[in-house]
Amino acid sequence: MAAHGSLDTAADHEPRDEPRLAGGRLPTLVMVVVYLAALGAFVGIVTVRGGPSVGDAYGVTKPATALADGDLHGAAHDSVLPQPPGYALLSAPFVLVLRPIIGSPTWCDARVPPVTRLFLPWCKPSQLATHHWYRSQAVLGLLAWVVFALGCTRLLRTAGAGGGVAEALLVIVLAAIPAASAGIVETFHPQDLVSFGLIGAAIAEVLRRRWVATGVLFGVAFLCKQFALLPLVAVLVAVPGWRERARVVLPAALVVGCGILPFAVVDASGTWSTLSAVESGGVVKLTTGTVLGMTNLTESTKLVIARDGPVVLALAMALWARRRVGRDLLTPVALIGLATACLAGRLVAEVWFSSYYLLAVSAGLLVLDLARRRLPVTSFLWIAVTGALVEQADGIPTSSPAAYVAFGASVAAVIIGLRAVTASARIPGGVPPRR
């Protein structure tokens, strides 16, 4: 019927020989069971892989404990990781309310090598029974996955593909992809999961034309991890006018300012150092790992390229996409594709390539496939290849061939995202946002 022509989805205009997901909504009870099963699967995977890592945990758990104790100076001193203090700010209330059940900032299990225990005074044999991960802030890493999953499903529903088989598949795969559990068990980085969950929710608000909510969510996402700036660039280019851009930027800046200002007041130089993430003092010299890592540039130069290069690339891709499709860039497939390409730009210019770095791109490609109502063959293949690449070397590629494969996979993700943008340009009227 002609009346529904403007409401056709991307799937309705793509080649019919591609495999499609079945439509229709699943009963609410079934979806609840799927979500609980996925969470249980994630907990099981984390447990089987040895439980949450103690690596880098001090940089987020100790500041959270200090904030729960009202010690801002201590929190600023303990915020030593190259990232904003957002995760500590979000987890501190849980630490305050739920201590002593999960208040401990430290944990240790028998899997920690004896040599490592020499540097972890709470990991003495007599103390192992009282320092299990499930009695500490490590448990909050499981809640980080919940935020991650809900943000992705929120985006899928806003794209008009949620509530059915696609959403159920999305949740299950998000629990199973290696990058999700790697962010907990290889190096404790739940902030990455939280940040991408908030990014997904923010893009969903963009599609609903809720600019202030978009800015707030992007602000909190940036406070958790700086890579949130990359999809924000895409969004700022995609929105229709300067007034709308201001309604996104100002709330985002206000949130970031409120989160960072107290730390900057008590430790200005330390706060700037962690935000810029270009100090090379603690960086091990890498001659492999990524194409950039194999160069003879100084470590400081490599870090500047790795931090600033993706932003420049994201801006260039966003401007090209806006020129290519115009205001159709605010349709679900186009915007998700562009955001994913911008996030993949981070991998193109990385100094090293760890498992959890794959999280954002893996989830973005998966949501992109499902938003197009097609079986996620492309995303599954990308996740499998990159997952095998990093897992074969304990999380980081260590050979020149592996570095080139990682670079090729990163470029491939950029191309996949940008092709989704151009595909949306061939769809009459695009895919309308869910109101």
Image: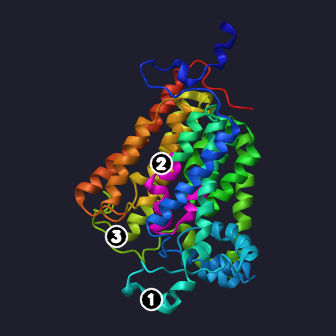
Say if mark 1 contacts mark 2, CB within 8 Å.
no
Quarter of the picture holding the N terminus: top right
The residue pinned by badge 3 equals 298
Q: Quadrant of residue 392?
A: bottom left
Name above or below for residue 400 compared with residue 23: below
Number of the front mark, 1 or 2: 1
**Amino acid at the residue labelled 3:** Thr
Between 97 and 354, the one nearer to me in the picture:
97
Residue 411 position in % (x across, y down): 37, 44
Number of the front mark, 3 or 2: 2
Do we see residue 416 in this rendering?
yes
The residue pinned by badge 1 equals 119
Please provide the residue range marked out in magenta: 173-195
Residue shown at 64% from the left, 80% from the top: 76
The secondary structure that most of the magenta stretch takes on is helix
Q: Secondary structure at mark 3?
A: loop
- Who comes first in sequence, dot 1 or dot 2? 1
Between 223 and 387, the one nearer to me in the picture:
387
Q: Secondary structure at mark 2?
A: helix
Q: Secondary structure at mark 1?
A: loop
- Who comes first in sequence, dot 3 or dot 2? 3
Name above or below for residue 88 compared with residue 426: below
Quarter of the picture holding the C terminus: top right
The residue pinned by badge 2 equals 361
Between 292 and 129, the one nearer to me in the picture:
129
Distance between the Cα atoms at labels 1 and 2? 34 Å
Residue shown at 49% from the left, 26% from the top: 20
Say if mark 3 contacts mark 2, CB within 8 Å.
no
**Residue 102 in magenta?**
no
Mark 1: few/some/many CA within 10 Å (<14, 14-19, 20+): few
In the rendered structure, the answer to whether residue 42 lies left or right of residue 33 reads left
**Amino acid at the residue labelled 1:** Phe
